[in-house]
Amino acid sequence: MCQQITEAPDLLHLFLRYTRSCIKLVVSEAANSSFQPLVRKRLTGDASARGDEEDGVRDRRERIHRLSTHQDAARKGLRNQDNGQEPRLETPYDTAKNSHFKDLRALGPLEVFRADLEEEGSFDEAVTGSDYAFLVAAPVNLRSENPEKELIKLGVQGTLNVMRSCVKAGTVKRVILTSSAGSVVVRPDLQGDGHVLDEDSWSDVDFLTATKSGFWAYPVSKVLLEKEASRFAGEHGISLVTVCPVVTAGAAPARQIHTSVPGCLSLLSGDEAAFGALRAMEASGVVALVHVDDLCRAELFVAEEEAAAGRYLCCAVNTTVREIACFLSENYPQYTVKTSLLSGDLLEKPRVRLSSAKLVREGFEYKYKRLDGMYDDMIDYGKALGILPN
């Protein structure tokens, strides 16, 4: 079964934090962890609804102590009614693994639906009455034995099934599709230095499918689902905006994490497998990062911004493994950077940069523009997870 993308659980938490609307969460059986928030009513309210910005650090610390097991719950499905009753399990087992939904519901109105990416009409009930649909997760089993089916075909099929439900509902004002910078940066022509990539850049599907090297199916799935979603939106008059985030940093309310956080902390933990993931990120010429809080805010921004259209790269920092190592050594002396991992051909400076100029030009402002803001709560998160010693 497919694994959960890293940012999906924290995005749910932050949607609840930053909106006053009722959130409908769809957990998909097929993807084993596909979370699709659907927002009813208006998105943002007054300043109190967004949360006091000065309390951001405190809020993140609280999240660290309310770690939630979203991936386990994805199999179970849970429906929360807006009547003050306890959440009702749609499948009567493993109640403990679904209990975190009670904590999330305390942050705002939350309904949870069960659906199947492969089944057309499976999302109809959840989408009915919704104003916005945020597609924030997709199949990500990078070690699948059949990636053409489990990543590429299922990713496209699931995306279109959600959009078909949006057409049937007739109330959805805009679909916000979360893709990935993986659909932007994997290009064999990016040799040498000085490359700046924006929304006009696409990963080379022909090259990837011909070579089938590494995790080739992931960027292919992202390119194809983006293009199919765009085609479908044009044919059915749907307002579609696509966000392409880079590697997400920061604390999340999930106990089971797969790539971003262990990779970002691997120079302190010494986890060679996780460092391999970090090193693989740099293979494209850059380690590009965004704090998950900023990613959520960007999703809401493009949903509300009337003129928003097309793709948006979401990237706050362009760096390298060596620059991260230097930063960690200077700012967290209580840990020892595992310099033995830094052997081989690593970049001193990024030779590729991902530009968020379009997003910023249209009025979005990043809160976390430096590594220190991204790593402060991630260090505590790593300790809470046992990745780092206390």
Image (cartoon, rainbow, N blue to C red):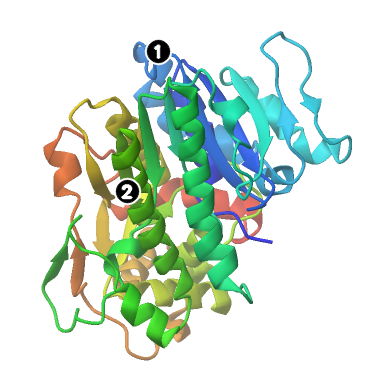
Q: Is residue 14 above or below residue 329?
A: above
Residue sticking out furthest to the front? 235
* The image quarter in which residue 82 lies: top right
Marking on residue 48: 1
Residue at the (47%, 46%) spot, across then down: 160
The three-letter code of the residue at mark 2 reads: Arg
Front residue of 56/39: it is 39
Q: Is residue 17 above or below residue 341?
A: above
The three-letter code of the residue at mark 1 reads: Ser
Q: Earlier in the sequence, mark 2 or mark 1?
A: 1
- Give how far across and how far down residue 3 sits, in percent: 62, 59
Does any portion of residue 212 appear in the rendered image?
yes
Q: Badge 2, how many Cα within 10 Å: few under 14, some, many 20+?
A: few
Label 1: state its secondary structure. Answer: helix
Which quadrant holds the N terminus? bottom right
Q: CA distance from mark 2 to mark 1?
A: 39 Å
